[in-house]
Each structure stands twice: as C-alpha cells, then as structure tokens.
Amino acid sequence: MDILAGIGAGVLAAGCGCWIYVLLTAAHNLRRMRRVETVPLPERAGWPRVSVVIPACNEGESLGAALREHLRGTYPNLEIILVNDRSTDNTGEIADALARSDPRLRVVHVRELPEGWLGKVHALHRGVLESAGEWLLFMDADVHVAPGTLERVVAWCETRGLDQVLLLPRLEAANLGMGMVNAFLVRSAAALMPVWAVEHPRLKVAAGGGVFCLLRREALDRTPGMARLRLEVIDDAALAYLLKAYGARGTVINGSGGVSLCWYRSLGAFTRGLEKNGFAAARYNLPALAAACLFLILLDWAPLLALAQPAVPWLRAAGAAALTVQVGVSVVVARWTRGRILPALLSPLAVLVMSFALLRSAALTLRRGEIVWRGTEYPLSLLREFMRNGKNMPLPPEPDGAPADAAGPEGSPR
C-alpha cells in the first residue's frame, strides 16, 4: 500500500469510526428526549398566559387558514401577536379581519425597518414588546400544532423548572427529494446534538429553532433582549445561546407527535431558502464551512467507500460495521420522529444537496458582498462586525413615531 492509499484508507477508517459517536449520541438522545405526546396533560384550575409571536411577510395566500387553526387551539389562556413585517400583499388585511372577530389576536404592522436590524429579529422584538404573557412562543404561521401540545409543554417546563424548550417537529415533504433532506436534518439533530450538554448549566451548548421555541419571559428579561440579536441571521440559535449565557435552563423535546410543517416544497426552494443563512451558520468563515461540509460528506460516504475496497479486508469490515450503524440509526430516528424509511436511507445523496446549498450560499454572499432577503440588503462587512463586536455596538434608534395602525408605540409598557 503506497502512501496516498494509506492516507485514503486512514481517512475512510476515521469516517467509519465517527459512527461510534453517532451511535452513542443517538442512543442517549432517544432515551433522554421526551416525546411530547407522552408528557402528562394535567388538570389545573389556571394556566399561565402564553403569548404566541408570529412574524409574517407576504403570507396572504396561507395566513388566514393558519391563523384560524391557531385560534382553534385548546390552550385556555392564549394571545397571538401577529407582526406584519412590511408585507406588500394582503397579509395585513387578512390579519386585521381575523383580529376584529377574535380579541385574542392582535396585529402589529411594521411599515419601516429601522437601520441596523434584520427584519425577522425586529418583528420578534416588536411582538415581545406588545405581548403580555408569562411565556413566549416564537413560531412560524404555517406550523401545525396538535390539540393539547402547548398545554403539555408548558406543564412540563413549569414542573421541571425549565426556561426554554425546543420542539423537534415532524417535517413533512411534498416529494422524495425534500423527504431525504428533511430526514437528513432530523437525523443530524437527533444523532449529532448532545442533549445532555444542552441541559448542562455550565456547558456552552444550546439548542434553538424557529419552528416552535417556548421561553419564559423572566428568562428573556434577564438578558439584553432581542436588541442584542438585531443582526443575527441565525437568530433562533443565537437566542438559545443568549438565554443560556444568562442562566436559563433549556432542553429539547421530540415534538413530532404534536408539531409539524411542510418546510420547503422543492429542492430548488430549499436551496434558495438557504441563501440567507447557509453561510451565516459558519459565521461567514469559508474554511470552517468547507470543513463542515467535507466532514458531513465523509461521515455519510465513508462506509460505502470503505466497503468498496476489496484489497483492504480490515477496511471493508469497518465499512460494513459503519454501514450497519448508519442504516440502523437512520431507520430508528425516522421511526422515532414519524418519518418515512426510504428518504432516511438516502442520506448520502441528501448530504450532497445540503453541502451544495451551503457552499452556494457562501459563494453568492461573497460575490455580492451582502445578503439579500425579502428585498432588503445587508452588507457582509456589517454582519461580520456584529458577530465580532455586536454587544459593544450602539443600538440604532427606531424611526420617529410608531405607525398609526400599529398595536402600540415602540417601547410602550407591556
């Protein structure tokens, strides 16, 4: 065996060996992570108020049905703050019409984005200011929540003294392509993210997501608030880390039995959707992003490539063992999260799609020198500076005066 062949065999063996970590992490997470439908639903005289904050931009096509579904929810002490973020369609009109028929729904209209803010973060900021709940639920409009789910999660948090919880949803797919990408993402969350580290108060590991993130208002009030995240593209993860840095206790729950959504309907839409946040996930560091993509590709392809080495029996044996673990973990996680088996077995293809989308995001961002999202341009230099020194950067002022049709003036007391 020459030097290059030896190096190649070593790399493949290392990739196969990584499946030991995946197996152990997945086994621990599946045993530790509670399934939301198994959380006891207590009978209690009173429930704390939950403020659901939903940012929306140009979602008129589906917003009405989504809001009506949320208003039919079973949680007894609920308010919904719909933040209409500069929509140019009929999003605002639909929300206003529903708000007139149900006092639990309030609408905040953002007509102008203040300088130095990302649109979604500012929308969440406005929603928090206008809310009155003891608990805040950040959620997208098109998320489906089964009856009793919110009650179970709130009760679980209060019983265990938790301040923040992330629910892993069931990701529904319109086709096989998105099915395999969804399955890959769910497996990555279930098998690579150590939940025990998320729950450990001294470890700097946190978990956040924009699909269904419930947090205690007191925990958010202990932090500098959403203003600290005003230019964070990966705002959901950044919020989780901010909360933990200020003492919040968090966890992750398997929410596939209570929360679901159809994320993207095609691989093309998925790839375009990652333009904004793909490069940001690596903190705008191209070598780090490339290394992460190479690792993920190696992890999923090493067992197959090792198995195809007839001249190296020990490597073939390692590949066979790793492939067995890979298939087993993929199938078990898919069943555990109510997913389909076939897409879960296509992870070697899914990782190529994911890597392409991430690297494309980096290439476009570097070429443009900015990210463009919903018609607003954000210079890359500003985003990088915020990541390095954001907590010391002065907060830009809000525009003078709140819009006349807003739910209340910026900064008004809750």
Image (cartoon, rainbow, N blue to C red):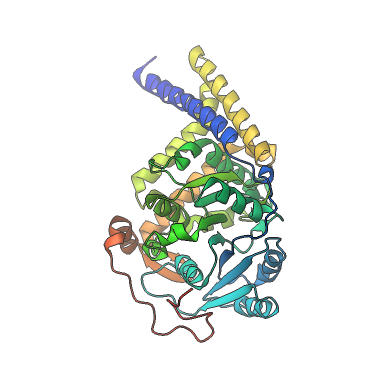
Is 173 rendered above or below residue 303? below
Residue 126 at x, y percent in the picture: 48, 72
Q: Is any part of residue 260 visible from this angle?
A: no
Residue at 42%, 64% in the rendered image: 226
Residue 244 at x, y percent in the picture: 41, 50
> Residue furthest toward the bottom?
404
Residue 11 at x, y percent in the picture: 41, 25
Apparent side of residue 108 relative to residue 46 in the rendered image (left or right): left
Is 147 rendered above or below residue 107? above
Residue at 38%, 77% in the rendered image: 398
Q: Nearer the viewer, residue 70 or 325?
A: 70
| Number of residue marks | 0
Residue 324 at x, y percent in the picture: 60, 24
- Displayed quadrant of residue 122: bottom left
Q: Nearer the viewer, residue 358 or 97?
A: 97
- Displayed quadrant of residue 254: top right
Q: Is any part of residue 55 visible from this angle?
A: yes
Q: Nearer the viewer, residue 321 or 242?
A: 242
Q: Nearer the viewer, residue 197 or 114?
A: 197
Identify the image quadrant of the N terminus: top left
- Displayed quadrant of residue 396: bottom left
